[in-house]
Amino acid sequence: MNKKYIFIGLLAAAVFQSCQQNKPAADETAAEVKLQSPSFDADSAFAYTKAQVDFGPRIPSTTAHAKCAAYLESKLKSFGGEVFIQQTTAKTYDGKSHQLKNIIAAFYPEKKQRVLVTAHWDARPFSDEDPNMGMRDKPFDAANDGASGVAVILEMARQIKEKQPEVGVDFILWDIEDYGSANDETPHETTWCLGSQYWYKNPPVKGYKPIYAINLDMVGGSNAQFTQDEVSRKYAPTVVSKVWSIAAEIGYGNYFINVASGNLIDDHYWINQAGIPAIDVIHYSDASGFYSNWHTQLDNLNNIDRNTLKAVGQTMLETIYREKSAL
């Protein structure tokens, strides 16, 4: 994924190791729990990941980017979403101008109580963390860092069309999230997350206030573990507790681990600035950093795990289907 440079506590590694020793053993309880949500299809989500990767790296101002935008808009419409494209010209840290497209879809817009789920759909232009120095200026597939979160959302949208939850659901696919400077020293790393920053400063719907929001980032890697970052804990502690508790209850506590992590400036930061309690579900820990293939040539389909997609997607659906509409 991107940006995010963290304030790491001196005891982070020790805390992480301690919690690792006590983590739940497998997803054995998943089959024993009666879900209120429809079954999340990991094969379908994997296919949606592949469809995005097949366009090529979705780098702003490329043909792959334009074709993928059309595909995502079409898919969300086919599932019954009311789709709106929020567009603007955005300048990246390197002085280049690009057409930014946030893809917004509303499901059951008549429902007043709503939940927002987001992910970024663009690809970083270069694999600047690759261990091979000669590859660091090359684009990469961005299968996990971008496509996986979008794929989970597409499968969620497909399921929500088939079985109506009690609350309305909105999805936003952020653009130009991952085109930031590795040397960003601005207070809130503003060279990153251009799509969510623009949305926050230019709200397409005045007074929009869902109950809460969940941002998905790098949610398809093998052996993923999602920690509770500082921004999520600060702005939306009850949402963190809700999601992590549901994950544990339905058998995915070995993915959603009860470990606190540092300050991450991701898209959820800007959602929170809009007054919406928002959390980040992201493959990161203070002890090991981001997903092992983050911003490298190995962020490809071979390293996407259906089990992780299932864990995240089912947890997201179950969270939404447990929400009750106000009387």
Image: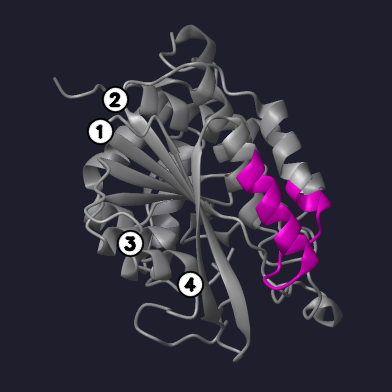
User: Which residue corresponds to the image point at 34% horizontal and 38% vertical from the top-left?
Assistant: 115
Of marks 2 and 3, the one in the foreground: 3
Q: Is residue 55 inside the magenta stretch?
A: yes
* Kind of residue at disc 2: Glu
Q: CA distance from mark 2 to mark 1?
A: 9 Å
The residue carrying pointer 1 sits among few (fewer than 14), some (14 to 19) or many (20 or more) residues within 10 Å by Cα, namely: some
Identify the image quadrant of the N terminus.
Answer: bottom right
In the picture of the structure, the residue carrying the numbered disc 4 is 194
Q: Is residue 59 inside the magenta stretch?
A: yes
* Kind of residue at disc 1: Gln
Q: Earlier in the sequence, mark 4 or mark 1?
A: 1
**Under tag 4, what secondary structure?**
helix
Residue 174: percent from the left, percent from the top? 52, 59
Identify the image quadrant of the C terminus.
Answer: top left
In the picture of the structure, the residue carrying the numbered disc 3 is 203
Q: CA distance from mark 4 to mark 1?
A: 27 Å
Looking at the image, residue 166 sits to the left or right of residue 298; the answer is left
Q: CA distance from mark 3 to mark 4?
A: 14 Å
Q: CA distance from mark 1 to mark 3?
A: 18 Å
User: Which residue corresponds to the image point at 79% horizontal and 65% vertical from the top-left?
Assistant: 63
Residue 55 appears anywhere in the view = yes
Q: Earlier in the sequence, mark 1 or mark 3?
A: 1
Name, please, the residue furthest toward the bottom: 95
In the picture of the structure, the residue carrying the numbered disc 1 is 113
The residue carrying pointer 3 sits among few (fewer than 14), some (14 to 19) or many (20 or more) residues within 10 Å by Cα, namely: some
Write the start and end of the magenta stretch as one range.
52-74
Q: Earlier in the sequence, mark 2 or mark 1?
A: 1
In the picture of the structure, the residue carrying the numbered disc 2 is 323
Q: Is residue 296 above or below residue 40?
A: below
Name, please, the residue furthest toward the right: 134
